Amino acid sequence: MSSTPSPSPHLAVFPGSFDPLTNGHVDIIERGCYIFDRVIVAVLINEAKTPLFTIKERVEIIREVFTGTPNVEVDTFDGLLVDYGRRKGADAIIRGLRAMSDFEYEFQMALMNRRLNHDIETVFLMPAEQYTYTSSRLIKEVFMLGGEVSGLVPDVVEDRLRNKQAILRDRLSGIRNANA
Ligand code: ADP
């Protein structure tokens, strides 16, 4: 009787800024875990952006949320995503698609990444409907203006946003002064 070779484990990289992690990201990571054996959440080191959370804080948050989920790893990267993926031996890149507005940029990026590396396939996953309007940017804006974000981010993110209130207040007054 011929035995079927067991398939090699499949690894996906989920790259992003995660400034901060939202429940939309969490939803995509969990869906990724159904499809792939391992998911690496890869936080992009991008000095050009002015993030609210440091890279270290963003990594800590994701690690805390996924403690007890051994197939989720957290890492950082800079440079070309496909080069990072190749170094890690990734089979796929996961990206989340919320709405048509995400599509054009994501489509271009996926085709460019395919051109750069044919061995890594981009896979798009849709979050649950309640997260289709959630983005890290919107969460920060709503929180800065005193709005309620519970249910849209993990509890640890809400706590950490409270600790960032002074920075957010400064940013808000900077925006108001610029518009005065
Ligand atoms: P980037 O700067 O790479 O867009 P983000 O942290 O904003 O970094 O997003 C990382 C990935 O997560 C992207 O594929 C983005 O489309 C996806 N994503 C962000 N928010 C959501 C959400 N609410 N639902 C599904 N996917 C999301």
Image (cartoon, helix red, strand yellow):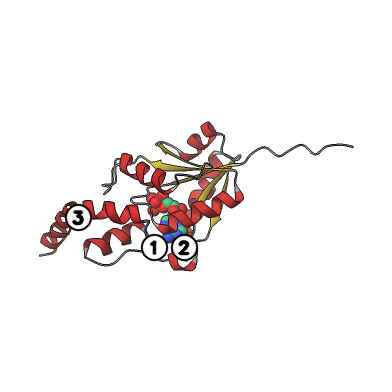
Of the image marks 1 and 2, the number of the one nearer the N terminus: 2
Q: Quadrant of the C terminus?
A: bottom left
**Residue 23 visible within the image:** yes
Q: Is residue 30 above or below residue 2?
A: below
Q: Nearer the viewer, residue 95 or 157?
A: 157
Assign a secondary structure to mark 3: helix
Q: Is residue 47 above or below residue 32?
A: above
* In contact (CB < 8 Å): disc 1 and disc 2: yes
Taking the image in four quarters, ligand 1 sits in the one at bottom left
Three-letter code for the amino acid on which mark 2 is drawn? Arg
Crowd rating for badge 1 (residues with CA inside 10 Å; few <14, some 14–19, many 20+): some
Residue drawn at x 48%, y 35% is: 84
Query: For the residues carrying marks 1 and 2, which lies nearer the camera in this image?
Result: 1
Q: Quadrant of the N terminus?
A: top right
Mark 2 residue's CB less than 8 Å from ligand 1: yes
Q: Residue furthest front?
A: 68
Alpha carbon separation for disc pair 1 and 2: 9 Å
What is the number of the mark on residue 146?
Answer: none
Three-letter code for the amino acid on which mark 1 is drawn? Thr
Residue drawn at x 14%, y 56% is: 174
Q: Which residue is mark 3?
A: 165
Residue 120 picture quarter: top right
Residue drawn at x 54%, y 55% is: 31
User: How far across and how far down the image is residue 161, in percent?
Assistant: 26, 54
Three-letter code for the amino acid on which mark 3 is drawn? Gln
Q: Which residue is mark 1?
A: 134
Alpha carbon separation for disc pair 2 and 3: 28 Å
Q: Which residue is mark 2?
A: 98
Assign a secondary structure to mark 1: loop
Alpha carbon separation for disc pair 1 and 3: 20 Å
